[in-house]
Amino acid sequence: MRNRSTLGTLALMLCCVGAQAQTIDHSNPNTGNDDLIATQSYNWGPVFLGGLCRLTDKGSSEAVSVFSKRQVNITHFENSFVFQILSGGPGDPSDGTGNVADGLTFTIQCMDSAALGGSGGGLGYEGLEHSIAIKFDPTPNSGDPSFSCTGLYTNGQGPFGGIDLLPQGVNIRNQHPFRVDMDYDGRLLQVRITDLVTQATARQSYPIDIAKTIGSPTAFVGFTAATGLGSAAQDIQKWFFTSPPLSDGLREGIWRSRLQGAQSTAKRLGVAKSASAWPTSAGHAPKRIAARKPAYQMKIASATR
Ligand SMILES: [Ca+2]
């Protein structure tokens, strides 16, 4: 029976990569939050009710994540949200510029909708494998260029260093709301950060094959945040993410990689013949599995046209 359970799980996974455009819409304050999973290291429930998702609540040494319940196509996407980092009040203004710590990330990862990284300068992201993150960092840890910086990090890398936003007139430590717009075409991730009070704008471009980096063309998308000795209330006020339907080529690539995984599991359980008789789904079952390769070796570029 265990092999049937494994194959049933595979069928469910394939249902999650269907042919419709994939959208996460929290731009309306009346939107519910049933499509999200929140995970936190403290007794607080970050939700998107009333159009606001409070990630950290001014306590110290907090870590939190909010991810989509289902995986979405991350080979191409558009993504917009508004964030605001409010001072945690008197505390440990260790850098002399006030108590505004530690920052947040937008993260794409294919491990678990409840994944959560380290607190403090780790921004709730450090340690998350099979992932990429863009950080919004108001706390100058060792290696950070200033108290207002951003950057791209991969596979759980510590989010330190990066790009100084101050020369472009963007100070994310000033407690203003900031709008972030991201566009990704499969090769270049373009990010625009706008101070909604001063209208100062900073732009960054990151050449990256996200699917190859994380090992999957689909992933959970969402936010991480953290506090440390210093703290802040870190809010996502609105969020809208959309990506196109998966192409037939991508769906077949996912099918191949996951069928290989199911066959490998079935073989380990001594039921390989049952796995090889796996029925078709939506006409995308491969005719033959040529070789066992990890998902990240799929030819993403050619499959996406
Ligand atoms: Ca930092």
Image (spheres, grey):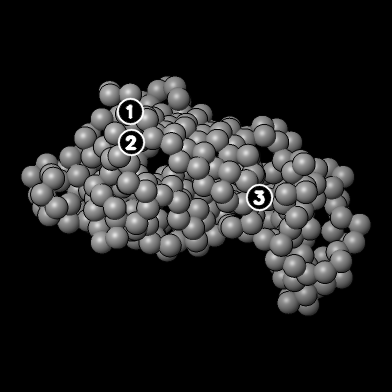
Estimate how packed mark 3 is, as few (under 14), some (14 to 19) or many (20 or more) residues with alpha carbons within 10 Å.
many
Asked whether disc 2 touches disc 1, contact meaning CB atoms under 8 Å apart, the reply is yes
Going from the N terminus, do you reach mark 1 or mark 3 first? Answer: 1
Residue at left offset 74%, top offset 43%? 304
Q: Secondary structure at mark 3?
A: loop
Residue at left offset 82%, top offset 65%? 275
Asked whether disc 2 touches disc 3, contact meaning CB atoms under 8 Å apart, the reply is no
The image quarter containing residue 20 is top right
Task: Give the amino acid at mark 1.
Answer: Ala
Which residue was labeled with disc 1?
A: 200
Q: Position of residue 24 (x, y in %)?
A: 53, 33
Disc 2 or disc 1, which is closer to the eye?
A: 2
Q: Nearer the viewer, residue 147 or 46?
A: 147
Which residue was labeled with disc 3?
A: 217
Ligand 1 within 8 Å, label 3 CB: no
Which residue was labeled with disc 2?
A: 168
Whether residue 265 is visible here, answered yes or no, is: yes
